[in-house]
Structure formats: C-alpha cells, structure tokens
Image (tube, grey):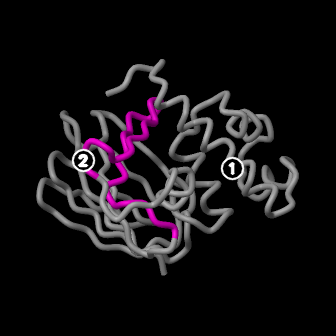
Amino acid sequence: MRSPEDPLDTRLDARLGTRLAELRAQHGWSLGELAERSGVSRSTLSRAERAEISPTAALLNRLCHVYGRTMSQLFSEVEAEPAPLVRAADQRLWEDRASGFVRRSVSPPHPGLRGELVEGRLTPGADIAYDRPPVTGLEQHLWVLDGALEVTDGEQVHLLGTGDCLRMRVFGPTRFRCAGSGETCYVLAVVRP
C-alpha cells in the first residue's frame, strides 16, 4: 500500500480532477447542474475537480453514471497513452482509503474497448455501496480469488467464497462487502452493453 503522501496518488487525483472538470464542461453543466444530476454536493464536486480531495469509489461511480462510462474508462482517460500490454508493476492502483478498497486496473487502458479486467481488494469490514451502475445494463463477472465476499445486486444477496464466480447485469444499486475476517481479493470482468 502507498502512504497518504505518495506523489503517485496526488498526480492521479490531479489528472482525475482535470478530467472530471473537462467532462462537466463538455456537457455544458454548472456545478449546480451536475450536483442535481449526480446527487453529490457542489462543494464535493468542486473539491474533487480541484484535486483537494481524493474521490471515493461511490463518488466516482455516481459521476461515471452521469457521464455514461465505467470507472475503468474514466481512469483510462487520464492515462498518458493506451498500450496493448501493461506489466504488473505498471498497472494502475487506486485506493479508496475511507472504505478499505484498493482497485487495480489489470487490462491495458483503451477507451474504445467494451471489456476490461479489474482486481479488487477489500480489507476486513470494507463495505462499498453503489446507488446506481456506472452504465445501465453493465455485465459483470466477479471471481473471488481469496476470501469471502457478499454481493448485493438490487434485492438479491450472494455470498461468494474463494473460487466462486458470479455473473450479473447491473441495472440498479449494488453493494460489495468483505464478508470474512481477512482481506478479500477478486477479479471483476466488466463488459459494457
């Protein structure tokens, strides 16, 4: 894990903030309009765009929903240049310290492709709720590599253990909760509709 002062975190937050501001400008929305559409306060949006805060997974999910892109697409848009191969040491890590979630972009970033692989790690007690999918109808294949994971898709609750795989299409709220006493590690294959 990186320390809170890691310059990589700061640079990524700055690029994310710039990209979020660009997306809002492209849509011609004020901070107030984006706040209404996303359900995120104007002050939080402003602070995220200026990289004064590191956005949480839930906040990015809300913004991705409004902009019609997955989180991986958003992250790929702040990368320097897409490459067909990304070595393990060069795969981007993003951490939501508040929720105990670490996300690794495994697939080489490319905004034009529909499928992507993401590795997720949840610390014991981590619980992430998304009130909407980033893209309605998103197909997800979730494969637990280690630990126990409780996944809620709408009203359906699934308890997954090591080796279990869940396939779902996301149309509403979801929740990912580390269900064991140790860390949970999983791979998420995402396919845009």
Mark nearest the camera among 1 and 2 is 2
**Residue 93 - label:** none
Which range is magenta?
Answer: 87-111
**Local crowd size for mark 2, using a 10 Å CA cut-off: few (<14), some (14–19), many (≥20):** few
Q: Residues within 10 Å of mark 1 (few under 14, many from 20)?
A: many
Image location (x, y in percent) of residue 25 = 81, 56
Tell me if residue 104 is in the magenta stretch: yes
Q: Residue at x 49, y 25 (%)?
A: 7
Query: In the rendering, which numbered label is found on residue 20?
Result: 1
First in residue order: circle 1 vs circle 2: 1
Tag 1: residue type? Leu
Kind of residue sitting beneath label 2: Ala
Q: Nearer the viewer, residue 168 or 48?
A: 48
- Quadrant hosting residue 51: top right
Q: Which residue is mark 2?
A: 88
Task: Examine the rendered structure and indicate whether residue 50 appears above or below residue 60.
Answer: above
